[in-house]
Amino acid sequence: MTVTGVGGVGKSRLVREVVDLGLVAAVEDCCWADLWQLRDDALLAALVADACGLSDHTPRLPVEVICDWIGERELLVVLDSCEHVLSACRGLVERLLARCPRLRIVVTSREVLGVEGEFVVVVEPLPCATDAPELFLRRAMELGHVPEPGDLNRVVELCSYLDGLPLALELAAGALRHCGVEDLLRRPRHELSRDEDAVRPVAPWRHDVLRTALGWSHELCTPAERLLWARLSIVQGHFDEALAVALCAGGPLSATDVGRALDRLVDQSVVTRRRGRFVLLDTVREYGRLWLAELGELEAMASRHASYFLTQARHADATWTSAEQTGWYRTIKEAHPDLCAALDYLTGHDADGALELATLTGFYWTCCGHAHTAQLYLSRTLKACGSQGRVRQRALWALGLTYLLQGNHAAGTHLARQCLEDARLTGNVTALLRAAYLQAMSDLLRGDPRPGLELLERALRAADAPGSGAAVQAVMMCRMLRLFALTGLGELKESLESATVLRAECVAMGEYWIRS
């Protein structure tokens, strides 16, 4: 089933309500994929696999993994906001339906997919004499802006003017804190141009209606609120106030201004609050991005956004084996669409930075079910970056890890040997530890733990030397893999003693990954 309609008509909210009420499937039998976060279709299947809770460690294509995992089970998959990756979604849906006989798929899109057997539901705006005024008045009352009784006829007229479009009505209700219903009706329609070629809307005039409501909200904002709206459009996913301050403060917008303006944008329905965090709906973000370009800040904000997430990744890596680890897991998970956006930007503007970011996030992604994403960006950034050095060495190590954990032992072992050779040439102990870890993992996976154990013990002795400068994370990982090798050789007493010591150190550090 494809639920289609113009932007702002409430497609996603309608489907979410139907799912939450259990009208089409139990909530636990539903997988929801937010496709709005995709910048292109390269990661479509990987994102859907992640929405299904799949942590695949095979070299197979993600779509094959999804098909095998669903199989004969009865399941509902929601693909939300497909219009910008329509062709790829069409192919994915056709393959899933062909392989999974009890699967049901609900798609939300501004345009129909055009697949065989597609049932199309067009979501129309609300009736302007009944439901539209009810929504407008309810939202206005929630915000503390109740129209006068004499304005109720004008409310119906306003709803007709806005064609009963839910998002436009909510934006208009938020605008009541600045002016009355009569004032809104006197305001002209908004004429800010935009390129419609990428998305062919169901009803072009309703895009004009939505832009009118967005234009009203924008015109009624203070300069600080307008600037914040524009700058926030660079964020791809959910955010909190700290992120808004870090990215958007500067020039005429102080950190204090950001907090105040953010609250007012929530009141005006420009920013949506969800579970204690904030998000810009697609249409609102698109509008803000237009103004960011008008201000001439698009390039600067994209660079600032990428730099921020690169810095975050560096901090996460530096404090990985500490009590901050679980917090960084959560941060990296929630920032997934923004990390991908930062990588896309850096690949075209700062190849070295792109390689570093892909490397720092690659280990987390590989171990947490995003192996295909990690492999894509590591391969892409290694090709884009021609420089040599420690970052490239570590990137090759991270790529080798994705290969090994996906079962591509030949490619993983080849990179492990290359990392060992590079580490010995440079004499860097941390690089040697990581290379030993990768080679030992290859040996273990092939069922031959003896050479891996000897290699790990040599690397750990080098790390114990005074002034080695070995990274704690690399040492801990090698000690963990040494336990696996000892166990594989039947040296259970020594393995248990070492494990007990290592686990106690992890508890003292507040570290969880190695401990588990």
Image (spheres, rainbow, N blue to C red):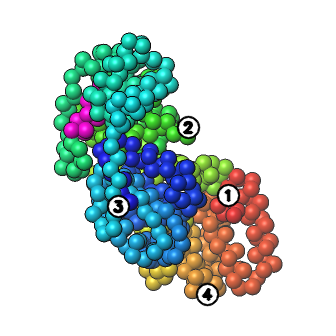
Towards the viewer: 368 or 359:
368
398 to 258, vertically: above or below: below
| Mark 2 neighbour class, 10 Å CA radius: few under 14, some 14 to 19, many 20 or more | few
Give the residue furthest to the front. Answer: 129
Image coords of residue 399 (percent x, y): 44, 69
Q: Quadrant of residue 96?
A: bottom left
Q: Secondary structure at mark 2?
A: loop
What amino acid is found at the position of numbered circle 2 in the picture?
Answer: Gly
Q: CA distance from mark 1 to mark 2?
A: 26 Å
Q: Residue at x 76, y 82 (%)?
A: 491
- Between disc 3 and disc 1, the foreground one is 3
Which range is magenta?
Answer: 205-217
* Tags 3 and 1 touching, CB below 8 Å: no
Q: Which mark is residue 119?
A: 3
Residue 7 seen: yes
* Tags 4 and 1 touching, CB below 8 Å: no
Q: Residue at x 38, y 60 (%)?
A: 1
Towards the viewer: 299 or 55:
55
Q: Which residue was labeled with disc 1?
A: 512
Residue 373 seen: no
Q: Which residue was labeled with disc 4?
A: 447
Q: Which residue was labeled with disc 2?
A: 276
Q: CA distance from mark 3 to mark 1?
A: 47 Å
414 magenta-colored: no
